[in-house]
Every structure is written in C-alpha cells, then in structure tokens.
Image: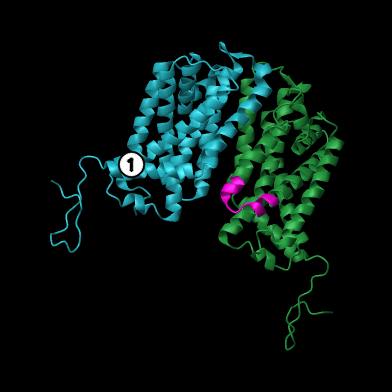
Chain colours: A cyan, B green
Amino acid sequence: MTDRTGGRAGSGAAPRVRSFGYVNWRGVWTLYHREVKRFLKVFTQTIAAPVVTTLLFYTIFSVALENRVGTVGAVPFVVFLAPGLIMMTILQNSFANTSSSIMVSKVQGNIVDVLMPPISPLEMMCAYIAGGVTRGMIVATASTTAMFFLVDLPFENPAAIAFFALSASVMLALLGMIGGIWADKFDHMAAITNFVIVPLSFLSGTFYSIERLPEAWQYFAQFNPFFYAIDGFRSGFIGQSDAGFWVGAAVMLGIDLVLFLIVHRMLVTGYKLKS
Amino acid sequence: MPPRNHIILGGRPVARRFGIVNYRGLATMYAREMLRGFKIWGITLAAPTVRALLFASVFGLAIDRPDAMMGGVPFIDFLLPGLVAVAALERSFQSSAFSIVYDKNEGIFPDLAMLPLTPGEIVFGYAAASVSASLIVGAVVWAALLLVGGAVPVAPLTLIFFVVIGSLMIGLFSQITGLWARKWDYLESVQTFIFMPFVFLSGVFFSIDELSATAQPFARANPVFYIVDGIRFAITGRADANPWVGAGVCIAVIVVLWVIVYRLFAAGYRMKS
C-alpha cells in the first residue's frame, strides 16, 4: 500500500513523496471547484449580466431590423439572429472566465498557489478549461431559455448544438488562458477583449450571413475561427450552414488541438508564470 | 496686499483665503480627473471608437436593402448619430463613478473631504470632467464614423448643446452611483442593469415609433431618449419628439440630480464615516 499521509516530520521514518496514481483527481477537482465558485460568487456579473446584455442586443437588433431584413437564407431574421447571440455570449464568457482568473491571480500574487501544488500542467489546464466551459454552458442555457420566450426557435440537430457549444467554449477558454498568461496588466487584458475578441465575434456572422460580405472580405472571414463556431452552432438550430457541418467541426477540433498544445507548452516552460 | 502664503513668517498661522471660488483647487481636481480618464486612452477613447465602427458595420451588413429607411431617413443616417450619443454617454457614466470607486478601494476617497473645496466645487469639478470627456469621445467617434458614411451636423452648436446636457445629466448620475457603490460589483451592476438598458432602449438603434403602443409611454419617459433624439436632430435635422421640449426635460432632471449630489457630498454620504 502506498503511504497516503505523505512525509511528516517527527514520524520517525524518512519523508516520502505523496503519490497520486496517474491523475491527481482530487487536485483537479479542487482547482475546478475553485474556478466555478469564483464566478458563481458574483453571479450577477457573470451570469445575469451576460443574459441581460444578450436580451438587450436581441431587442435592439430585432426592433431595428426585423422589418428591414426579412429572411436570411430560408429563415426569418430573428431566428437567424438568436443562435448567433447565444454563441457570442458563450465565447465572451468562456474567455472572460479563464483570462480574468489567471490575471487576478497574477496581480494579487496568488498564482503561486496554483503553480506549487502537485498537479501537472495538463491537469491544471483541464481544470481551468472546465471552469470556463462550465460558465459558458450556464450562460448559454440561461440565454437559450430566455430566448424561447421571444423567438420560435427550431432544434434541427441537438448534437451539433452541443458539439459547437462545447468546442467553441474550449477554444475561448484556451484563448483566455493564453491572454491571461501573456497580459501583464489589466489594460492589456482590456485591449485583447476590446480589439480582438469583440471585433472577431461581431464580424463573425452573428448578424448577417457571410454571403452578404464583398468577395474579398468573404475570403478573410473564412480565417475567423469565430465564424465556424457561430455558423456551426446556428446550423444546429436552423439546419442551414454557410460552411458545412464537417468543415466547421474539423476547424473547431483543429484549432482546439493547436491551442491546447500552445497552452500546455506555456505551462510546461512556465512562460511569464515562473521566473 | 494680504500675503498669499498661509503661514505668515514669524506670526501666527491663519487660514488661507481663496475668494469666493477656489479656482486653483478646482482646476487641479479637473486636471486630475481628465488625466486619469485619458491616461488609459486605449480603454476610454479607442475602444468606444472601435465599438461604434463595429455597430455601424454589422447594421450596414445586415441590411440587405440599400434603401432601408428608419424614421423617415436612410437607416445609416439614423443610426450613426445614435452611436455618437452612446459613446459620449458611456464615457460620461464611467468617468466620475469609476474615479470615486477607485479612490474608495485605495482608501483615499475621504481625502476629498479634507481639501479646501466646497461640496459645490467638488460636484462641479467631477461634472466638468465628465462633460469634457464626453465631448472629446463624441468628437473622435463622430470623426471615425465619417469613414462609414457619417454626416456633418446640420446644427453644430445644437449638437454641442445636447452632448453637454446629456453628459452632464449622466455625469451627475455617475457621481451618485460612485458615492453609493461600495465595490466594483455595485458599479458594474448599475451599468449592466440600469444604464445600458436605458441607453440601448432609448432610440439609439431604432425610432421609437417602431415600438408597440404599450412600450411607447415608457420609451418617452426615459430622459436618455431626449438626449439621443436631440443629438440626432442636431446631426440629421429629424427628431422623434420636439427637441426643445426634450432639452427642457433634461435640464429639469439635471437640476434635481445636482441638488441630490450636492446634498450627498455636503452630508459626506459614504465618505465621512
């Protein structure tokens, strides 16, 4: 039997390293638990606020454009709009969760409390990602429920909805970790949010079909990963897609994998975290 | 001439005298507020400009008919003045409240009570900074929107007038929010659950004629509506309501808010404990 007590001074025997098996489940669970409690404690900011903002956006776009746009593809404008707004809030909240967590820890100096415990970089990032995904999913569920009272939303393909919600949430949780690790100050974080995340999510086809763009811009839009997230997620509801399900799924998995490797590398080398 | 120094060498110390208004104190406070706001210009100036351009782009792209109208003018002409208004009012809301809550967190807010500034001067200092910041942000956003089809205002002085009373009204509200807020959370809650709905539903993005008959009275009871409508009137020459009635409503609201803020500062609400 392994010694689960770890080395205690004065126990007579030489201190030994505590062993965990292959995965430090308790460590991962503890970090995940902290990540979730972090945002639930201020749920008015982290859950209620995004839902209210999403509904506000829905209201202004539907009142302003419902009679001026008509249909997008085969569906009414509001049915086209609603899934895009839900995805936008998933993207922004998953990003906000991991980035703010790491940023605040760095500024307050308690990031060492995450780096010192016996959890591997892989375990650590899984806990952070799961925290970001949890927030994304809670906000998404709340927004979708609220949308039900406003729009007659179809559910063509629930599997696609779930897949794109999760893969997009993972993508942004990973981007949030990169941002949080890279940024030295809150100003840097605000710059990433204002000048990268918000523009990419606005211009990703939430409010219009990508075909509406001029030719040259359509080409660039294809390189915006948020476009695939929103397009795939929406196709789960309305059954029509600009990019195609399999293309979208492949892009999402590919990006998640690349970002995963980048963040893993950052944590292993201690980039900007260990000096 | 009385000595300018507050300690007469070799004599007893006497209180420094300022005349009726402590101009230097006021100017110092104003300069601090302005520097504090625009030191982080990426957040306070560039970000709202980018956001306004984004809103203009997505509305422009979403509308598939170039002849789409709103309230009797082409949609984009209707929208852009609204975006200028949002940017100006947001800056005004964030200026004083942000500053006050920051000082509270640092524990230096009560220092304000020790300065030789009267409550009226403090209110004026914060308000002047709010209004100036809004004018700057409004001008920059307006200039940026020229790139996407913005118009030269038909009545520039009217435009300045409406931005000034709008930002003064919101700036005073911001001071109340800042005084009330104990933490950032409070401030963010007011912004998300009160300020944003009032501004977004005030007719920035749509003419309130588009709203249902039941929603109309609520929209017209929103003072921000008169600001946005007035700013649009000054730029495009069209308005949902009579802009001068709107100005009257706003000035009345400003007087009430000013009295409230003055009383709060004079009483040391959440400042002197």
Front-most of A76 and A218?
A76
Q: Amino acid at mark 1?
A: Trp
The reply to whether residue B142 is visible in this rendering is no
The reply to whether residue B156 is visible in this rendering is yes
Front-most of B136 and B271?
B271
Q: In what element is the residue under mark 1?
A: helix
Q: Quadrant of residue A194?
A: top right
Q: Quadrant of the C terminus of chain A?
A: bottom left
Residue B115 picture location, percent across and down: 70, 67
Packing grade of label 1 (10 A; few <14, some 14-19, many >=20) is: some
Residue extending farthest top: A74
Residue B86 picture location, percent across and down: 69, 37
Residue B214 picture location, percent across and down: 75, 25
The stretch of residues the image draws in magenta is B176-188
Q: Quadrant of residue B246?
A: top right
Residue A203 picture location, percent across and down: 55, 27
Q: Quadrant of residue A32?
A: top left
Residue drawn at 32 percent across, 40 percent down: A264
The chief SS type of the magenta part is helix
Residue drawn at 44 percent across, 21 percent down: A161
Q: Is residue A254 left or right of residue A17?
A: right
Residue topped by disc 1? A29
Residue A111 in magenta stretch: no
**What subunit carries mark 1?**
A
Q: Is residue A242 left or right of residue B186?
A: left
Front-most of A213 and A149?
A149
Residue drawn at 49 percent across, 50 percent down: A185
Front-most of A197 and B153?
A197
Q: Is residue B158 left or right of residue A64?
A: right
